[in-house]
Amino acid sequence: MMNLKKRKLKYAAIFGICWFALLVILVDGILKFQTLVDYVGSYALVETTLLLLVILPTLAIYRFTKEDHN
């Protein structure tokens, strides 16, 4: 039973790291963070939104990853 939870956690962690890296490249490299802050008008709102864009999909991957029943 413990192995199954570790497996789900591993998949969610891999997804979270890759998704975070993609967002960092997108926000810091292409969109420029300060441009987003200027467009939205709030540093805290941009930071919170970006944090939620990493956490929520990662939790969804963890929740919806199927367990292997042997």
Image (spheres, rainbow, N blue to C red):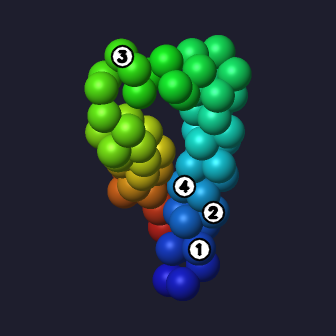
The residues tagged by marks 1 and 2 sit, at their Cα atoms, a distance apart of: 6 Å
The residues tagged by marks 4 and 2 sit, at their Cα atoms, a distance apart of: 5 Å
| Residue toward you, 43 or 65 | 43
Q: Which residue type carries mark 4?
A: Ala
Q: Earlier in the sequence, mark 3 or mark 4?
A: 4
The residues tagged by marks 3 and 4 sit, at their Cα atoms, a distance apart of: 31 Å
Q: Which residue type carries mark 1?
A: Lys
Look at the numbered disc 1 and give the secondary structure of its residue: helix
Residue 48, position in %: x, y? 35, 46
Q: Nearer the viewer, mark 3 or mark 4?
A: 3
> Crowding at label 4, few (<14), some or many (≥20) Cα neighbours within 10 Å?
many
> Crowding at label 1, few (<14), some or many (≥20) Cα neighbours within 10 Å?
few
User: Which quarter of the picture shows residue 50?
Assistant: top left
Question: Would you say residue 66 is visible in this rendering?
Answer: no
Marks 1 & 2, CB-CB < 8 Å contact: yes
User: Which residue is rendered at x = 53% and y = 63% of the image?
Assistant: 8
Residue under numbered circle 2: 10
User: Which quarter of the picture shows residue 30?
Assistant: top right
Look at the numbered disc 2 and give the secondary structure of its residue: helix
Q: Nearer the viewer, mark 2 or mark 3?
A: 3
Look at the numbered disc 4 and give the secondary structure of its residue: helix
Q: Which residue type carries mark 3?
A: Tyr
User: Which quarter of the picture shows residue 25?
Assistant: top right
Residue under numbered circle 1: 6
Quadrant occupied by the C terminus = bottom right
Q: Is residue 34 above or below residue 69?
A: above
Left or right: 19, with 39 as reference point:
right
Residue under numbered circle 3: 39
User: Which residue is rendered at x = 55% and y = 66% of the image?
Assistant: 9
Q: Nearer the viewer, mark 1 or mark 3?
A: 3
Look at the numbered disc 3 and give the secondary structure of its residue: helix
| Residue toward you, 40 or 49 | 40
